[in-house]
Amino acid sequence: MTLAPVASVSVSPASASVVAGQTVHLMATPRDANGTVLTGRVVTWASSNTAGATVTGGGLVTGASAGSVTITAT
């Protein structure tokens, strides 16, 4: 069985604020080219600035310091 390729990943909430020491949980939804939700896919999370915020493999973001950080899901 061939899995449909992931065309996009939406993150919810699309934007969030978190202060140092606090957390926010993000959810990722992979979709195919037709917009159909794909299940059973592994999502990889990354922080653009781990000094500002870190993110776990499950999408839990922890604020570390003031500033802007982009969290991505692929």
Image (cartoon, grey):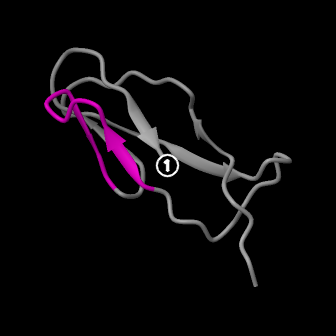
Report if residue 25 is visible in the image: no
Judge whether 59 appears above or below 71 on screen: below
**Which residue is found at the position 34% from the left and 44% from the top?**
46
Judge whether 37 appears above or below 55 on screen: below
Instruction: Name the kind of residue labelled 1 in the image.
Output: Thr
- Residue 55 counted in the magenta span: yes
Query: Which residue position holds label 1?
Result: 74
**Which residue is found at the position 27% from the left and 34% from the top?**
22
**Which residue is found at the position 69% from the left and 47% from the top?**
7
State the SS at label 1.
Answer: loop
Magenta residues (range): 44-56
| Foreground of the two, 64 or 42 | 42
From the viewer's perspective, tell me whether residue 63 is left or right of residue 58. Answer: left
**Which residue is found at the position 19% from the left and 33% from the top?**
21
Which percent across, then down, holds residue 51? 13, 30
| Foreground of the two, 50 or 34 | 34
